[in-house]
Image: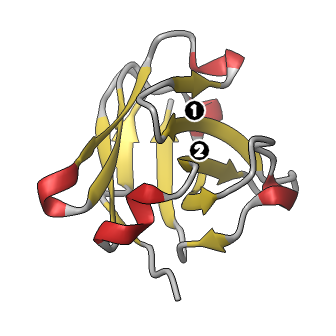
Amino acid sequence: QVQLEESGGGLVQAGGSLRLSCATSERTFSRYAMAWFRQAPGKEREFVAALIWNGDVNYADFVEGRFTISKNTAKNTLFLQMNNLKPEDTAVYFCATSNSRVLTATHIDYWGQGTQVTVSS
């Protein structure tokens, strides 16, 4: 059983920064990908960023260089550093992991409970 626990969400003004964390177990990082998704009210869950087992990273187009996904292997923690936040970034952010090369919500094997990010204008 894979457990994922997010933290670090909160309320921030537009242009501000937040760093999300996802605590997990060592064996989780041996899976194909660790990823972040988000879901805004009334919208579908969407891909944000992924860290592939070989070190490759993928980002959604809307990230536009503002977010950075990384990990601390010694602490078994995945991060999402979010800078220059916009009101449209407001959503619940989910940590996820998959053994599929197709990184869509339907191909995720395990989800965290989510952490709320609210960006005020």
Q: Is residue 64 left or right of residue 19?
A: right
At x 47%, y 41%, the residue is 53
In which quadrant of the rendered view does residue 71 lie?
top left
Mark 1 neighbour class, 10 Å CA radius: few under 14, some 14 to 19, many 20 or more = some
Answer above or below: position of 98 versus 84: below
Q: Amino acid at mark 2?
A: Thr
At x 81%, y 42%, the residue is 102
Answer above or below: position of 7 versus 101: below
Mark 2 neighbour class, 10 Å CA radius: few under 14, some 14 to 19, many 20 or more = many
Secondary structure at badge 1 equals helix
Question: Where is residue 28 drawn, in percent x and y?
Answer: 43, 66
Q: Is residue 103 left or right of residue 27?
A: right
Answer above or below: position of 90 versus 24: above
At x 78%, y 53%, the residue is 45
Asked whether 54 or 86 is in front, the reply is: 54
For the residues labelled 2 and 1, say whether their Cβ atoms are less than 8 Å apart: yes
Question: Where is residue 110 drawn, in percent x and y?
Answer: 63, 73
Q: Amino acid at mark 1?
A: Pro
Identify residue for label 2.
Answer: 90
Identify residue for label 1.
Answer: 87
Secondary structure at badge 2 equals loop
Question: Where is residue 30 drawn, in percent x and y?
Answer: 43, 57
Asked whether 7 or 24 is in front, the reply is: 24
